[in-house]
Amino acid sequence: MSAPLRVGLIGLGTVGQAVLRVLARNGDEIARRCGRRVVVTHAAMRDPHRVRDCDLAGITVGTDPHAVAGADVDAVVELIGGISPARELILAALGRGRAVVTANKALLAEHGNQISQAARAAGAHLAYEAAVGGGIPIIKVLREGLAANSIDSLAGIINGTSNYILTQMAARGQSFADALADAQKLGYAEADPTFDVEGVDAAHKLAILASIAFGVPLNFAAVAREGIGQVTPQDIQLAQELGYCIKPLGLAKRSAEGIQMWVHPTLVPAAHPLARTDGALNAIRVHGDAVGQIVCAGRGAGGEATASAVIADLVDVARMQGAAPRHLVPDLGFQPGALRELPVVPAGNVASAYYLRLRVADEPGVLRAITSILAELDISIEAILQKEPREHEDATLAIITSEIADARARGALERMQALPFVRPGASRLRVEHFE
Amino acid sequence: MSAPLRVGLIGLGTVGQAVLRVLARNGDEIARRCGRRVVVTHAAMRDPHRVRDCDLAGITVGTDPHAVAGADVDAVVELIGGISPARELILAALGRGRAVVTANKALLAEHGNQISQAARAAGAHLAYEAAVGGGIPIIKVLREGLAANSIDSLAGIINGTSNYILTQMAARGQSFADALADAQKLGYAEADPTFDVEGVDAAHKLAILASIAFGVPLNFAAVAREGIGQVTPQDIQLAQELGYCIKPLGLAKRSAEGIQMWVHPTLVPAAHPLARTDGALNAIRVHGDAVGQIVCAGRGAGGEATASAVIADLVDVARMQGAAPRHLVPDLGFQPGALRELPVVPAGNVASAYYLRLRVADEPGVLRAITSILAELDISIEAILQKEPREHEDATLAIITSEIADARARGALERMQALPFVRPGASRLRVEHFE
């Protein structure tokens, strides 16, 4: 057997400790797969006394991450997250020709073009399976497994926290605020939940997936976002009656007009596998011209699921060490010179079916006035649901439109809200049929 | 860009023609991914006049497959299926150092150990993503994406024909014979459907998946099979009322006792993603100790879906050509010397929950007699359903047992069938909870 792959680990939190635990438990079997042992020789963390569930014997442990990035190792694993000092550490390791494995989606989404270029310049291996979808090997599936396809769209539930919250709201009829508070108590949501519930984390991941699916440079800034805080228990209930589940969806599409990327709470047909991806699970649907629809689902977070992805990358690194760079899978899926900018469809032009929900006075002529607006704007109604109001209460009206540009959906809703008998507080959500 | 990868294609049926079509359509994008063009230069088929939907310009087309196996190409793609002459052609190509890509699950399951050894001896690249799961890149997911895991079980709907038939039976209340006849008319089933409905095709695929999941040599002979012809519309109905769908399941498990592999019609919880895999779709569930449960679903057959897998292999071949063999992913997932035989759990010892269905006379004391047998044999009843009989008809009784060894389930059923008021024609199906 060849010499072990020597690994430096930066960050020994939940994922870092899980990496050590899985390597200890499955080290023999991993060596049977890749022909070498994968051995962590150096590690850095803020407080080495916090490590509990794993054995640090034989590992040089310190508090200085730069010492690990510069250590005599074959590969550096970055698990501290955030932009700085992660970026400097990764660039330093790549600059020394080390392979780098990272789970840092924020860094890749925002600075991945630069990091990819640095890896290329150094002829170094850069891998990041753990950055998207936790243990689901979606990066490998997209870059290699579906390499024959022209991929026209991908969509996923790629943030477990927001999926957990919407699932709890649906199961218990809870408000967003209550479900969020429960999720925080249970450790499913951070004290500051912005990154998750506002779609920033999902947008990071979507930018990465879109780049490797379409062969475009990373463009996080072009991902449109809407948070899940706008979804009410009533929306979830109405959506169900119309045959949909509301899911925190990230979607990227390529068409003749260019690419669109967005993260929105979205109505998904109840029978689709994504609608049935509940709790903290992740699922990604890819549509390619040859393969059709592929759906991969699994744990999107958690120490060992993420460690599964980190170690899969290390196995690739171990196998490829010493091979000429042309034999490596290009880190963004396409050859370095072959990434091509595509126009981004302007937000107002992005077409989708829409769910519109209004509170209206219980008066004659209301439905006629609203449907007249839609008819004048040439918007077809695919489904409509008016719930019988309790006495002296307002009625609720939910409409699923045909596919229309975002700007037209906004315009239609604005005109409806200007009607005298329409109350404030309407809702407008996208509907995705995956056709 | 490097020189094109020159491919010889043996077999120009549905899949072969789809390979040519997808390469023509996506050739530019594929080259952007792998840095080389993938070009079919030679092809063989029985009757070249039958090719319709693809362009043969620039391809040397003949009727002799041996000429392609021996042609001056970089890779040979075998798409004729069957054992002979596929085996001889593949061994000849490998012997000349050519990379070989095949979709031939029967050949791999039955002679894969020999073929893998020949590839190793020649230092040649052997790839077979298309052999299991059509366009789903399950081989790559298992061999590479989940390489960190000790995989304890995998289960899948890996034969589209039998899944289509059971889905139609459930949707229409059809008998097996009627659903099979319809499937044959629509081209979903062969004139001789044995391979599909008796589980032979699924057993071939399961043997391959089990080998790369557990690191054991291929052992097709150890896969137990039961066909779907035993399933009645009534079983499907009763299973539904008990919260299950009946699916054509292939399952492989590793435990302290050894490995078990079987292909059976099986009751699957209605909420599980595999239960919702309908029609000709395939889905595979893998459980690893680090990653937990991963499910991948998609088209398991069809020209372009299968071509997607064949071309993904060709992209790997194109990228790795010229690299030292140690850089290749070992074809059976584990290093050549690291495959290890594991004992096969004897059929009678394989433990499972069971669904037992009986027709019984509508008499007092029947339920007591049957439940007494189960109590005497120390078998717990997890669920029981007795349907009210129409007047003068027999009653139907369905029982879900706790997990018991196969031999005990058979024994219990035999004792029940010996009771005077139990009619002939009972049913015994496995129940899999994926826990």
Image: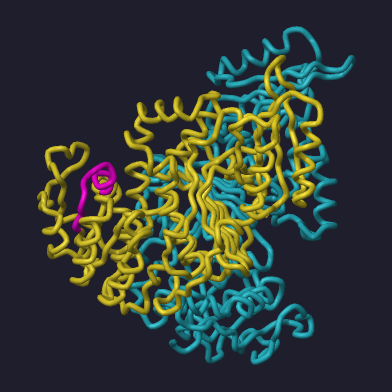
Chain colours: A cyan, B yellow
Residue B176 visible here: yes
Residue drawn at x 68%, y 31% is B422
Q: x, y (%) of residue A276?
A: 64, 42
Q: Quadrant of residue A399?
A: top right
Q: x, y (%) of residue A257?
A: 41, 40
Up-down relation of residue B50 to residue B294 (above or below): above
In depth, the one of B65 and B251 nearer the eye is B251
Up-down relation of residue A76 to residue B181 (above or below): below
Q: x, y (%) of residue A302?
A: 68, 64
In depth, the one of A333 and B167 nearer the eye is B167
Q: Is residue B410 magenta?
A: no
Left or right side of B345 for B63: left
- In the image, which residues are magenta? B8-19
Left or right side of A369 for B146: left
Left or right side of B278 for B41: left
Q: Is residue B14 magenta?
A: yes
Up-down relation of residue A380 to residue A124 (above or below): above
Left or right side of A21 for A250: left
Q: Quadrant of residue A145?
A: bottom left
Residue A306 visible here: no
Residue drawn at x 42%, y 76% is B335
Q: x, y (%) of residue A324?
A: 33, 78
Quadrant of the snapshot with the C terminus of chain B: bottom right
